[in-house]
Amino acid sequence: MYGIYSNSTVIAQFAAPMTVRSNHPVYASDALNLSRQITRRTAQRWEIESALEPLSSGAQDLFAHIVSYGYSTPITIITPQNYGAILKRTSTSSPTASASANSVSVTVSGNVNLIPAGTFIKFSNHNKVYMVTGDRSGNGAMGIYPALRTSVSGTAFTHRDDVQMTCHYDLDTTIGMTFTDGILMDLGTIKLVEAV
């Protein structure tokens, strides 16, 4: 179950439509001969726009959460995994990884079966969430995006439906409550940005 996480439970589930976007600043310019020059910055964050499942009996928890955290205090979400990756994955292990900072691949140990491309992962020693760029069956090199922010050495990582991301409510999110049909709290679409 993916959504806003508080007090060891998901208090508001994500619902369709949902967009998970990689914000990776790129600068582009065209030369006089029309060749394109592109420069990509190293900064990257994930941004999620999603509807939330309308709430009735649990609406007070979400309302209190949104008001108390506001725009400035980081929150935790359970990161939505790509549906195709969910169908393809067979790994149920608790693997570890090693690599130096700025690497685009990590060496995986203790993995049994498949961690597919498109899977979100998070290392236990820092808050950044990464995406696997190619299938990894068993142990060996596994590509990640973006480049590793902090070195890992035998560091455990989560890769299933337990990947927690630290985010901020975006400034467009209503800090309050909106009701439809009198008893259903429905905020419409909210936007969350990864705290980097």
Image (cartoon, rainbow, N blue to C red):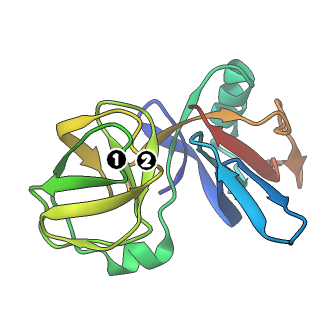
Circle 2: element type: loop
**Residue 87 is drawn in which quadrant?**
bottom left
Image x and y of residue 142, in percent:
27, 62
Circle 1: element type: loop
State whether residue 94 appears in this view: no
Image x and y of residue 57, in percent:
65, 44
Name the residue type under label 2: Ala
Q: Residue furthest left?
A: 110
- 149, 17: nearer the viewer: 149
In this picture, residue 144 sits left or right of residue 37: left
- Specify the label residue 156 is tagged with: none
- 13, 185: nearer the viewer: 13
Q: Residue furthest front?
A: 33
Image x and y of residue 34, in percent:
86, 72
**Where does label 2 land, which residue?**
147
In this picture, residue 187 sits left or right of residue 58: right
Distance between the alpha carbons at the discs numbered 2 and 1? 5 Å
- 67, 108: nearer the viewer: 108
Residue 117 sits above or below residue 175 on the image: below
- Specify the label residue 103 is tagged with: 1
State whether residue 20 appears in this view: yes
Residue 135 sits above or below residue 76 on the image: below
N-terminal-most mark, 2 or 1: 1
Say if mark 2 contacts mark 1, CB within 8 Å. Answer: yes
Instruction: Identify the residue shown where x is 41% and y is 74%.
Output: 85
Mark 1: few/some/many CA within 10 Å (<14, 14-19, 20+): some
